[in-house]
Image (cartoon, rainbow, N blue to C red):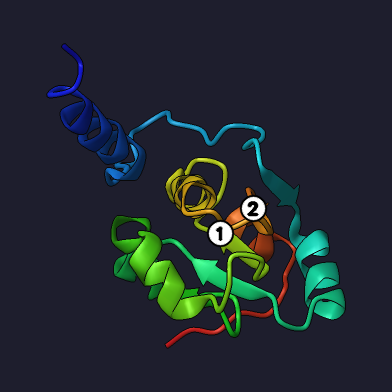
Amino acid sequence: MYGKLLPVIVVLAWGALTAPVQAEKGVVAPDNIHGTVKVDAEGLIDLVGTIPDLVIIDARIRQDRAQGFIEDSISLPDVKTDCVSLSKILPGKSSPVLFYCNGVKCVRSGHSSRIALGCGYNRVYWFRGGFEEWKDNNYPFVKD
């Protein structure tokens, strides 16, 4: 009975996990994402100092990144994040990767983190405060 429906259910479930997330007014990122290690701005600096192969991914869209970004971060908006795009950036499932976006009112980095976890990556860091916290701490950033 479920044999014919199972492929449809799997496709729908995968689509729900990987569908683009639209930021809505009043939306706030969760406090934690199971499977990730949440860091703040100082924690990111510590990670860069202790994990030389850390890949920092900016999950924001192009317009947001144009306002500035953390040096050496790679632009991969959440709407373009999937297992294939991640495999082009990360050499292996145990590669350390950190996602960030605009801040606590941005859900893009959380969305990208969940996709990475779903793809089997197991060293996922999440900078919940994102670019807003980075700037508020007067840390340097790059602006094109």
- Image-based side of 68 in relation to 96, left or right: left
Rendered location of residue 26, percent (x, y): 42, 28
Vertical position of residue 80 compared to residue 106: above or below: below
Along the polypeptide, which appears first: circle 2 or circle 1?
A: 1
Local packing at callout 2 (Cα closer than 10 Å; few below 14, some 14-19, many 20+) is many
- Image-based side of 98 in relation to 24, left or right: right
- Image-based side of 28 in relation to 46, left or right: left
- Which amino acid, by three-letter code, is at mark 1? Tyr
Q: Residue at x 60, y 83 (%)?
A: 71
Vertical position of residue 15 compared to residue 47: above or below: above
Q: Quadrant of the N terminus?
A: top left
Vertical position of residue 99 compared to residue 38: above or below: below
- Observer-nearest of 111 and 117: 117
Tell me how many marks there are: 2
Local packing at callout 1 (Cα closer than 10 Å; few below 14, some 14-19, many 20+) is many
Which residue in the protein does label 2 denote? 126
Can residue 3 be seen here? The reply is yes
Q: In which quarter of the image is the C terminus?
A: bottom left
Check whether the beta carbons of the residues at disc 2 and disc 1 lie within 8 A of each other.
yes
- Which amino acid, by three-letter code, is at mark 2? Trp
- Image-based side of 100 in relation to 7, left or right: right
Q: In which quarter of the image is residue 95?
A: bottom right
User: How far apart in space, not on screen, are marks 2 and 1 (Cα)?
Assistant: 6 Å
Q: Residue at x 41, y 79 (%)?
A: 88
Rendered location of residue 36, percent (x, y): 67, 46
Disc ID at residue 18? none
Which residue in the protein does label 1 denote? 100
Rendered location of residue 24, percent (x, y): 33, 34
Q: Which residue is drawn at 59% across and 85% down?
A: 72
SS at mark 1 in the image = strand
